C-alpha cells in the first residue's frame, strides 16, 4: 500500500524535486545523470581492469623484473578511483551552469577551488 508521500506519484519518479525550475525526471536532468553515471561506471570498470591486469602480470614467471611497471599500473588504477568523484563534480557543475542553476554551479566551483588549494598546499609542504 502506498504511503502518504507516494500518493499520486508515478512509479519510478523521485520523491524529492531537484533545483528550483527543474522538473524531476526531465530530459535534461536525466541526460546529466546518465553522463555522470557513465563517468563513474567507466572509472570503476577501468580501475578494476587495471588492478586485474596487475594481478595477472604478477602471477607470471619473471614478474620481479617488471616491479616498477606493476607499481605504476596499480597506481594508475588507484588514481582512477580517486579522480572519478572530482570528474563527477566537474560534469555536474557544467550541467548546472548550462541549465543556469548558478547557485549550485557556484557551489561546485567552490568545492573544486578548495580541492585545488588543498592539493597545492599538500605539494608545497
Image (cartoon, rainbow, N blue to C red):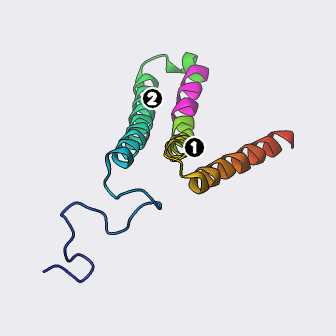
Q: Name the residue under label 2.
A: 50
Q: Residue 125 location, x and y as percent?
A: 87, 43
Does the segment drawn in magenta span residue 118? no
Q: Do the residues labelled 2 and 1 touch (CB within 8 Å)?
A: no
What secondary structure is marked by label 1?
helix
Name which residue lies at 23% across and 75% down. 6
Q: Main secondary structure of the magenta part?
A: helix
Q: Residue 47 location, x and y as percent?
A: 45, 34
Name which residue lies at 46% across and 27% down. 54
Name which residue lies at 41% across and 43% down. 32
Of 16 and 112, which appears nearest the observer? 16
Q: Name the residue under label 1.
A: 86
Q: In this view, does 15 lie above or below 46?
A: below
Q: Residue 99 location, x and y as percent?
A: 49, 46
Q: Residue furthest bottom?
A: 4
Q: Quadrant of residue 46?
A: top left
Amino acid at each position: 500500500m502506498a504511503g502518504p508521500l507516494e500518493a499520486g506519484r508515478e512509479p519510478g519518479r523521485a520523491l524529492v524535486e531537484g533545483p528550483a525550475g527543474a522538473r524531476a525526471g526531465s530530459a535534461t536532468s536525466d541526460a546529466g545523470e546518465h553522463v555522470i553515471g557513465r563517468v563513474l561506471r567507466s572509472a570503476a570498470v577501468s580501475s578494476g581492469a587495471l588492478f586485474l591486469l596487475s594481478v595477472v602480470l604478477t602471477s607470471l614467471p619473471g614478474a620481479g623484473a617488471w616491479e616498477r611497471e606493476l607499481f605504476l599500473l596499480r597506481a594508475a588504477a588507484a588514481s582512477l578511483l580517486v579522480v572519478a568523484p572530482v570528474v563527477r563534480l566537474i560534469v555536474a557543475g557544467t550541467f548546472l551552469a548550462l541549465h543556469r542553476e548558478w547557485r549550485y554551479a557556484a557551489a561546485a566551483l567552490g568545492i573544486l577551488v578548495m580541492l585545488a588549494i588543498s592539493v597545492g598546499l599538500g605539494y608545497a609542504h
